[in-house]
Image (cartoon, rainbow, N blue to C red):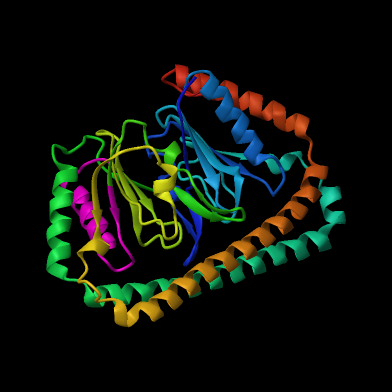
């Protein structure tokens, strides 16, 4: 059996749908298969079965999950980024960059019966419009929640001692990067370790980090210094050319929750847990080093703002919870939409298409050339 890792390449955020799809697979990939077709045509099951097949064959597999349906896949990456199969439909539209040479489109829509769909044209349009409306409302709630997040951070920035934040930031970053060197495979890969989904907040961090990863834990309220430290760390990684995986906050992707150095099995992560419970998902693992920025604040300095901070927290939590309700409603409409396509599909032909693709990928993995090419 190969190893599997699990990510989210996109998310429902305070800026709307936010995608890191460009980082899902390395540019050196030999072959990238882009699936097209409507909802319910079987793209996710198509990818799951391919992933399971190659994992059983001993290949490492990356599973990239959908933030709007955490049981569905947006993509899989096989082996050492040798091949990838991606969902290329909205909202993460993917078009071939190197058609034929690297990228190949597989249109699963060719296996549906158009007559069945045109007969239900009106309902399909109405339900699709309802889905768009639900996501618009969800993103409004997340944007409102972000205003509360920003207000909360203002109070912390007002009373913190910047010299103390800077001193601790420099010390911890230097410790984290000690002994690292420029990598021939230098570069950053940006993804999400979690997502705001119709099932609530979901994290996959325990399926990303190896069990022996050295953990550097930081925590603190918004504005206390956590963001400053991680931004400085990422800047230093860019300057020194260390290979890194950068995991962004599923609510506000402008912020970063975790940085992982795969060559050194070393991760620095925010375990503040006021939105995303990373510590809970890594319970039982020991931290090599910890830093709590809230402990560096002047005593009682927040007392004059305590009530306003409590109100901001409440608005933040309410906004996210309301957004989840709208995303869950969108999922209900999406399930209804899928029913029309499921009834119109020729799944036996899709199964044959999947078997043919598995054969092509096996040839690719076992030969230097691509099937049908010199």
Q: Is residue 144 left or right of residue 300?
A: right
Magenta stretch holds residue 230: yes
Residue 107: give x, y in percent of width and height. 65, 41
Q: Position of residue 312 (x, y in %)?
A: 43, 75
At 21% from the left and 41% from the top, the residue drawn is 242
Residue 338 in view of the camera = yes
Query: Is residue 355 found inside the magenta-colored segment of the image?
Result: no
Vertical arrangement, residue 133 with respect to residue 250, above or below: below
Q: Is residue 264 left or right of residue 104?
A: left
Task: Give the camera-side residue of 3 and 39.
Answer: 3
Whole-percent x, y for residue 178 in the image: 14, 41
Image quadrant assignment for residue 227: bottom left
Residue drawn at the location 47% of the way across and 50% of the way down: 194
Q: Nearer the viewer, residue 28 or 319?
A: 319
Front residue (pair 197, 291): 291
Magenta-colored span: 217-243
Is 78 or 359 nearer to us in this picture?
Answer: 78
Taking the image as shown, residue 352 lies to the left or right of residue 16, namely right
Q: Is residue 295 above or below residue 58?
A: below
**Quick check: 69 above or below 223?**
above
Horizontal relation, residue 141 to residue 288: left or right: right
State which quadrant residue 219 falls in.
Answer: bottom left
Q: Residue at x 26, y 40 (%)?
A: 243
């Amino acid at each position: 059996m190969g190893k599997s890792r699990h990510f989210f390449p996109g998310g429902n955020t305070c800026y709307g749908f936010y995608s890191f799809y460009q980082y899902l697979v390395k540019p050196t990939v030999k072959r990238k298969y882009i699936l097209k077709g409507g909802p319910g045509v079987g793209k996710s099951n198509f990818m799951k079965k391919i992933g399971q097949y190659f994992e059983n064959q001993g290949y490492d597999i990356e599973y990239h999950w959908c933030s709007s349906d955490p049981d569905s896949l947006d993509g899989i990456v096989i082996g050492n980024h040798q091949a990838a199969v991606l969902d290329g439909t909205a909202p993460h539209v993917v078009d071939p960059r190197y058609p034929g040479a690297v990228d190949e489109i597989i249109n699963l829509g060719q296996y549906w019966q158009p007559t069945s769909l045109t007969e239900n044209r009106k309902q399909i349009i109405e339900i699709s419009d309802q889905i768009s409306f639900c996501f618009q409302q969800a993103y409004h709630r997340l944007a409102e929640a972000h205003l509360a997040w920003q207000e909360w951070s203002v109070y912390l920035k007002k009373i913190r001692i910047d010299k103390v934040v800077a001193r601790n930031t420099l010390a911890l970053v230097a410790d984290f990067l000690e002994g690292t060197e420029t990598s021939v495979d230098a570069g950053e890969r940006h993804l999400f370790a979690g997502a705001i989904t119709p099932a609530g907040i979901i994290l996959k961090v325990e399926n990303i980090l190896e069990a022996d990863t050295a953990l550097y834990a930081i925590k603190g309220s918004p504005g206390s210094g956590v963001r400053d430290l991680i931004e400085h760390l990422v800047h230093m990684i860019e300057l020194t050319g260390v290979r890194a995986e950068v995991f962004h906050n599923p609510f506000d992707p402008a912020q970063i929750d975790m940085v992982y150095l795969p060559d050194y099995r070393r991760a620095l992560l925010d375990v503040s847990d006021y939105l995303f419970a990373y510590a809970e998902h890594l319970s039982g693992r020991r931290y090599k080093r910890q830093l709590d920025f809230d402990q560096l604040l002047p005593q009682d300095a927040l007392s004059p703002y305590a009530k306003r901070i409590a109100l901001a927290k409440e608005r933040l939590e309410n906004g996210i919870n309301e957004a989840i309700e709208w995303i869950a409603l969108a999922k209900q409409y999406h399930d209804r939409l899928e029913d029309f396509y499921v009834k119109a599909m020729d799944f036996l032909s899709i199964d044959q298409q999947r078997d043919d693709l598995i054969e092509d990928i096996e040839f690719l993995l076992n030969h230097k050339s691509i099937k049908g090419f010199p």
